[in-house]
Image: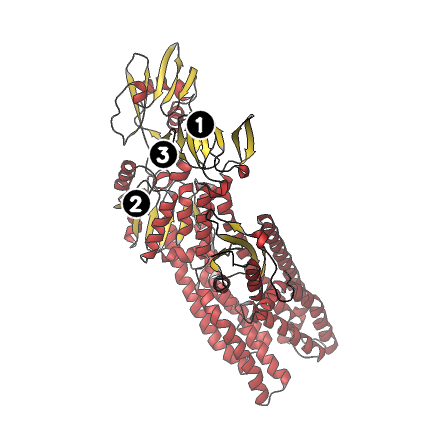
Amino acid sequence: MTYDAGRPADLSAFLKRDPKGAPSVDLLVRGARCAGCLAKIEREVLALPGVKEARFNLTTGKLTVGFASTAGDPGRVVETVERLGYSATPYDPSQAQAIYDREGRALILAMAVAAFGAMNTMMFSVPLWAGLFGQELGPATRTVMMWLSGAVGAPCAIYAGMPFFRSAWRSLKAGRANMDVPISIGVILTLVISFSETLLQGRDAYFDAAVSLLFLLLIGRWLDHQLRAKARGAAADLLALQATAATRLEAGGERRVPISELAPGDVLLVRPGERLPVDAVVEEGASELDNALLTGETAAVDVGPGQLCRAGAVNLTGMLRLKVVARSEDSALAGIARLVEAGAQARSRYVRLADKAAALYVPVVHTVAALTFVGGWALGLGPREALIRAVAVLIVTCPCALGLAVPAVQITASARLFRKGVLVKSGAALERLAEVDHVIFDKTGVLTEGRPKLVDPVPSCLALAAPLARASRHPLARALAGEAGAGPIASEVREHAGLGVEGVIDGRRARLGRAIFLGIEPQDASETELWFGFEGDTKIRFRFTDAVRPDAAAAVAALKARGLEVEILSGDVAPSVRRAADEVGVDVWRAGLTPEGKAASVDACARQGHRVLMVGDGLNDAAALAKAHCAMAPGSALEASQNAADLVFSGEGLMAVVEAYDIARSARRRALENFGFASLYNLVAAPAAMLGFVNPFIAALAMSGSSLVVTLNALRTGGR
């Protein structure tokens, strides 16, 4: 982005306006990698005149800026972001994905070059090391080996270090220093010292140390990139559940149009089995809607003229004529996607212990290295010896041990959990899981199996109703048909919207559906049931239940024994939630909650000082999963919910939640031990390097040894 005469570019064409007319702009920001970047960008943009709000999503790179009036200038926002050391352009999802993919390929290539350089530089370094064991090379051969080591190692180090060099340069241009600054300085000075030693026919060169260090650091950078890629998919998966096209009624008849063309006031036709594309009000017709993805309620919901229907619901029985009340981007489903994205953004504010330590590391190490050089020269050392000591300080205090303190533990803990059927999607999730003190379960599909199950089926009665059940789309009818197995299907089948299905079985007319559909007075409204009967004959009642998982009560008891509070939030009806809560031993529960209601409940719990673990599986849980301090989802959950969660557990058991919590607590202890060792190591190693007891070669060995110690300690991570 360029500017003429100090004036920002005119980006007014990219302004969007909400229903109230307030302008906003979305920008793609590149180069931001940590919570500090996020806070800095939002703080500086909010300080601009006319800016009402600034929300930056670290995962997607999208900066949304809202203006209080037309006085807001998006060009000035771009100028401010670029002054901070980042690049900013109008947001384009396809461009954002292309840039993200390009960054991933660049990291893989840099990592491959670093691996090649590390392996091949060693071929020439090992003969040099052999001199330590009395197998001294001749001066000429030694010089040749050092030059060959530099010829291979230096180009590889320069190429592989570019991700760090660029980041460090942007940071320095903005007048700040991030973690890539000492890494870049250490690598560059190591190469300079190595070439200096080679030219002066010194004893040691450290090309292998520089390229090996970059290889280790690039592994961590690439893993971070992959975790971000997975996090980006949550909101996209939610929106993918929205229908891509709709049947719009026009003067010339019906026409299929993309949902992006729908506007409030349009009239749509939605047939049985189709998903509602946008939020709309019923103008004509009656039907039952499957809102399980949106609300978690197991029973179908009756709808008729005048009632609001939400995007994402499935029309089960009757044909509906609907009037659109909101565009696709303003639908309930899109709103849930925005909540998920906002939750991911809030999650990125979590400052890990390593970040806090790193914030101190940068200025302290720079100061110590500079004092070593200046002090050594002032005390009579030559500039060459003083520089070697300063470089030794940078190498021996390299943040490898500090950087591995948490990731090594996370990798070990993740491997143990994987063997127990739990997939950890984010290393930081283990830190958050160890901190939780309040657990919230969804009911349907989490505490329960999520499938309607026939209670005490009588084979003879089941055989009578099965032909009609096989002809219906209704979830309860499908459960009945599944219990009966394959067989004949009724003829002359006709669906009655909101009531049931009617047909002919062996020449006799029969009905399957609600009690009132068969002329029976409804009994217990809290029961999930279907009635069946032949015309003029005895009526049969089928009761259904959503069975609680076999180990749900044991898992709840185990969590309570560990001092955690347990609660149930559900979109299902109160009687069903109460039964499940009583069965598993949970005292606090709430029913009939919308997705927004669940997310608000998680927020309220957090405001009370709790750190919440949310365990859910439905689309209605996705926003709450994203808002929670930590989130888990079963393997049977929707892909969108799995993407919004930090951990996914397979199998039918809930004890995986307890095991994950125990291992996370153990991992936290090991991480703190590693931090303690890394701190002690730096307190001893840095003074030793300053006093000349450690040269760059010994510093590289010590740095590698410290990394090995924290890795071995990480292997001790286990259960409770």
Rendered location of residue 458, percent (x, y): 31, 21
With respect to residue 35, does 97 lie above or below? above
Foreground disc of the pair 2, 1: 1
With respect to residue 108, does 83 lie above or below? below
Left or right position of 311 against 88: left
Q: Which residue is mark 3?
A: 298
Rendered location of residue 365, percent (x, y): 52, 75
**Quarter of the image with the N terminus in it:** bottom right
Left or right position of 320 against 164: left
Element assignment for label 2: helix
Quadrant of the rendered image containing residue 676:
bottom left
Residue type for callout 3: Thr
Left or right position of 360 against 144: left
Rendered location of residue 283, percent (x, y): 42, 29
Element assignment for label 3: loop
Residue type for callout 2: Ala
Foreground disc of the pair 3, 2: 3
Q: Which residue is mark 1?
A: 320
Q: Residues within 10 Å of mark 1 (few under 14, many from 20)?
A: many
Q: Which callout, 3 or 2, points at the residue further toward the start of the chain?
A: 3
Which sits in the foreground, 560 or 439?
439
Which sits in the foreground, 79 or 485?
79
With respect to residue 434, does 381 lie above or below? below
Residue found 35% across the figure and 17% down from its top: 511
Q: Which callout, 3 or 1, points at the residue further toward the start of the chain?
A: 3
Q: Residues within 10 Å of mark 2 (few under 14, many from 20)?
A: some
Q: CA distance from mark 3 to mark 1?
A: 21 Å
Contact (Cβ within 8 Å) of mark 3 with mark 2 = no
Q: Residues within 10 Å of mark 3 (few under 14, many from 20)?
A: many
Q: Which callout, 2 or 1, points at the residue further toward the start of the chain?
A: 1
Which sits in the foreground, 377 or 320?
320
Q: Which residue is mark 2?
A: 554
